[in-house]
Image: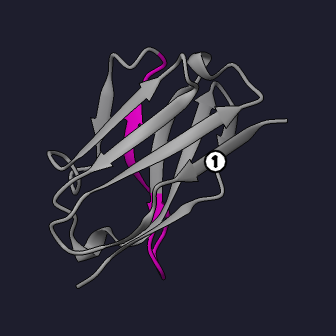
Amino acid sequence: QVQLVESGGGLVQPGGSLRLSCAASGFNFSSYAMSWHRQAPGKERELVAFITTAGGITHYADSVRGRFTISRDNAKSTMYLQMNSLKTEDTAVYYCKATMWHINYWGQGTQVTVSS
């Protein structure tokens, strides 16, 4: 049974930090590219960050580049998103996604709220 379980979301003040985790099971994690996406109320889901299978290549949305860092630990089948200097506009549900060719798996999401 394929599972992607996000954790680490919560309420944080502007300028604060959070670290999201995405724990994978039920598939060969190291063979899948991984990504974080987010969806704010009333907006479409958007790509936040992407990382290749071995972690050698990463890509970030312009809105988070320099503030967020994506990483993965294939031995633990887990992906991370370190989020620093958070802004109110980062408020959204954050989802992790696993991709290999035409196969995509999604997690259930974790809420991140940035508010004073």
Residue 73 in the figure: left or right of residue 98:
left
Q: Is residue 112 magenta?
A: no
Residue 14, compared with residue 74, is above or below; it is: below
What percent of the width, then of the height, locates residue 33?
A: 52, 26
Residue in the picture at 36% in, 72% down:
91
Q: Is residue 40 one of those drawn in magenta?
A: yes
| Start-end of magenta stretch | 38-53
Q: Is residue 24 left or right of residue 41?
A: right
Amino acid on which the number 1 mark rests in the picture? Val
The local crowd at label 1, few if under 14, some if 14 to 19, many if 20 or more residues have their Cα within 10 Å, is: some
Corner quadrant of residue 54:
top left
Front residue (pair 108, 8): 8
Residue identifier under label 1: 5
Position of 16 with respect to 39 (left or right) is left
Residue 13: quarter of image: bottom left
Picture quadrant where residue 2 is located: top right
Q: Is residue 49 above or below residue 101?
A: below
Residue 3 horizontal/vertical position (percent): 73, 41
Q: Position of residue 52 (x, y in %)?
A: 43, 22
Quadrant into which the N terminus falls: top right
* Most distant residue in the right direction: 1
x 37%, y 31%: residue: 71
Quadrant into which the C terminus falls: bottom left
In the rendered image, residue 32, in percent from the top left (x then y), is placed at 58, 23
Q: State the colouring used for the structure image.
A: one colour
For the point 31% across and 68% down, which residue is it?
90
Question: Is label 1 in a helix, a strand or a loop?
Answer: strand
